[in-house]
Amino acid sequence: MANIAVQRIKREFKEVLKSEETSKNQIKVDLVDENFTELKGEIAGPPDTPYEGGRYQLEIKIPETYPFNPPKVRFITKIWHPNISSVTGAICLDILKDQWAAAMTLRTVLLSLQALLAAAEPDDPQDAVVANQYKQNPEMFKQTARLWSHVYAGAPVSSPEYTHKIDKLCAMGFEKNAVIVALSSKSWDVETATELLLSN
């Protein structure tokens, strides 16, 4: 990895560790390897959102060309959000694409991702199914996002009705993650979710 990238990321890594703002917002970063090419981030779900109480792990890969190109970031923790793929964790955020500027830092990226959890952009989605639900049935979206936060990110328990539907399909022998995805994408309708599970 180019020397400029290593020096820069070392400095930014320390900046995140020392920043009052990141510790107040419960944002962390750890090294995955000693040469600073891969980091693991963690952000807390922002208050007053369906993600509150959850802790979200991020994979952060630093390119050779950093800081002239953005880091490659994806969610490792599964999340139900219009701008984050519920399958791969890929993120749709302008600063991680064409709006990146060399003056931006690791701290900027982590704070921006936390802000994205609080302010989705459904008109520029990464996950069309989630964005559709967000626009057409905001209450169901909130309940679904809260349930995913509970199951995957350790947030407090959410809707008992949704949990019951998951248990019902799991009892039929389907795998839990597949059940959650099917119910979430089929508006929590047990019948159509079952059809989807049987067709896969």
Image: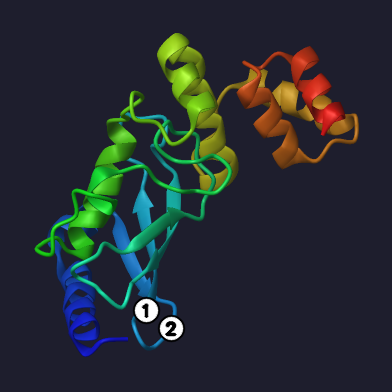
Give whichever of 161, 6 is nearer the camera: 6
Q: Quadrant of the N terminus?
A: bottom left
Residue 23 horizontal/vertical position (percent): 22, 59
Left/right of residue 115 with respect to residue 139 in the rendered view: left
Q: Amino acid at mark 2?
A: Asp
Q: Residues within 10 Å of mark 2 (few under 14, many from 20)?
A: few
The residue wearing badge 2 is 33
Left/right of residue 97 with respect to residue 83 in the rendered view: left
Residue 126 horizontal/vertical position (percent): 43, 36
Q: Residue at x 33, y 68 (%)?
A: 29
Q: Residue at x 82, y 27 (%)?
A: 169
User: Mark 1 and mark 2 in contact (Cβ < 8 Å)?
Assistant: yes
- Decide if residue 45 is in sight here: yes
Q: Amino acid at mark 1?
A: Thr
Residue 33 horizontal/vertical position (percent): 43, 83
- Decide if residue 25 is in sight here: no
